[in-house]
C-alpha cells in the first residue's frame, strides 16, 4: 500500500500558520479531503481512513471509496447510508475519496417554525448569516414533515462520472420524521472545490436511516450555525488525480 501524503500541497502553504490546527483554531477549520470536481470526474478511491479523518472533526458529510453511499458525521459518530437507505457504523479502516468535517461549535442558534420548504429554509438561513463569503457548518434538528434523501450504489471500475452515477441513485422518502440535517454552506467562489451554497445530509433521530438531502419540508426545527473562516484542503497524492483535466467545464452535478 502506497504511503499517504495527503497533506502535500495545501499543507505546505498552511503548515506554518495553522499547525497544530486544533490547538490554535479550535473548531473553526473546515477540513476537506480532495475536491468536488475530482469526485464528479469519477475519482472514487481515496487514501485517507476514517480513523484519520475523525482527528479533524466529528461533524460533516462525504462519501466512501467506490462511492459506497453517503456519509453523515454527527456528535463524533460516523454513519454510512448505503443504497438500501439504512445507516451503518463506519469502521476506522474505511477510506474516503471526498469528505468535509469540522469540530462543531455553534456561534448562533435560531428557531424555524414550520412548515418551511428547502428554498424557504435556505432563505431563512441566508437572512441570518453575517456574510455569504465564509463557510458555515449547519446543524438543523427537529421534526420534518417530509424529507427526500438519496444514496448512491457502490461502483466498480472503470468508474463512471458522478453525473452518470446519480441516474442510478436510490431515493428515500420520509414523512413526519425526527432527525438532524448535517452540512455546510460554502461561498460561491469555492466552485469546483466544494459545493457552492447548501449541501446537507440527513440522519434520523434513531440513527437508522438518512442520505443526501434532495427535498425537505420542516416542522419546527432548531438551527445551529458554526461560522468557519479557515478552510483546509487535503489533496490526493495519486495518479488519477494528478492526470485529471479539470479545465473541462462539464463537471456539473
Ligand atoms: Zn451529499
Image: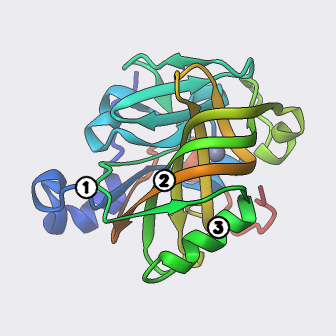
Q: Mark 3 or mark 2, which is nearer the start of the sequence?
A: 3
Cα distance between the residues tagged 2 and 1: 20 Å
Image side of residue 244 versus residue 18, left or right: right
Foreground mark, 3 or 1, reads: 3
Q: Nearer the viewer, residue 233 or 54?
A: 54
Tell me if mark 2 has few (under 14), some (14-19) or many (20+) residues whose alpha carbon lies within 10 angstroms of its own: some
Q: Quadrant of residue 116?
A: bottom right
Q: Mark 1 or mark 3, which is nearer the start of the sequence?
A: 1
Is residue 151 visible to the viewer in this orientation of the structure? Answer: no
Image side of residue 246 versus residue 49, left or right: right
Answer yes or no: do the residues labelled 3 and 1 have beta carbons within 8 Å? no
Q: Name the residue under label 2.
A: 222
Q: Mark 3 points at which residue?
A: 122
Residue at the right extreme?
167
Q: What residue is rendered at 65% in x and 63% in y? A: 121
Cα distance between the residues tagged 3 and 1: 23 Å
Tell me if mark 3 has few (under 14), some (14-19) or many (20+) residues whose alpha carbon lies within 10 angstroms of its own: some
Instruction: Pinpoint residue 49: horizontal percent, then vertical percent.
Output: 39, 28
Instruction: Pinpoint residue 169: horizontal percent, then vertical percent.
Output: 82, 33
Q: In which quarter of the image is residue 130?
A: bottom left
Which label belongs to residue 27?
1
Amino acid at each position: 500500500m502506497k504511503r499517504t501524503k495527503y497533506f502535500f500541497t495545501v499543507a505546505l502553504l498552511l503548515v506554518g500558520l495553522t499547525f497544530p490546527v486544533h490547538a490554535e483554531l479550535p473548531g473553526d477549520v473546515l477540513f476537506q479531503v480532495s475536491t468536488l470536481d475530482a469526485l464528479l470526474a469519477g475519482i472514487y478511491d481515496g487514501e485517507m481512513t476514517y480513523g484519520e479523518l475523525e482527528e479533524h472533526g466529528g461533524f460533516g458529510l462525504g462519501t466512501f471509496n467506490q462511492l459506497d453511499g453517503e456519509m453523515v458525521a454527527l456528535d463524533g459518530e460516523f454513519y454510512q447510508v448505503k443504497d438500501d437507505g439504512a445507516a451503518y457504523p463506519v469502521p476506522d479502516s474505511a477510506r474516503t475519496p471526498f469528505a468535509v468535517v469540522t469540530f462543531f461549535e455553534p456561534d448562533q442558534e435560531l428557531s424555524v417554525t414550520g412548515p418551511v420548504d428547502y428554498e424557504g429554509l435556505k432563505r431563512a438561513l441566508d437572512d441570518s448569516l453575517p456574510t455569504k463569503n465564509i463557510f458555515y457548518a449547519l446543524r438543523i434538528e427537529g421534526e420534518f414533515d417530509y424529507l427526500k434523501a438519496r444514496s448512491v450504489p457502490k461502483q466498480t471500475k472503470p468508474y463512471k462520472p458522478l453525473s452518470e452515477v446519480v441516474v442510478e441513485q436510490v431515493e428515500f422518502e420520509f414523512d413526519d420524521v425526527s432527525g438532524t440535517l448535517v452540512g455546510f454552506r460554502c461561498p460561491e467562489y469555492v466552485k469546483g472545490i466544494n459545493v457552492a451554497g447548501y449541501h446537507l445530509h440527513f440522519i434520523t433521530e434513531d440513527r437508522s436511516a438518512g442520505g443526501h438531502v434532495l427535498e425537505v419540508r420542516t416542522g419546527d426545527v432548531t438551527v445551529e450555525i458554526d461560522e468557519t473562516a479557515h478552510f483546509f484542503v487535503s489533496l490526493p497524492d495519486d495518479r488519477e488525480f494528478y492526470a485529471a483535466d479539470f479545465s473541462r467545464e462539464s463537471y456539473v452535478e
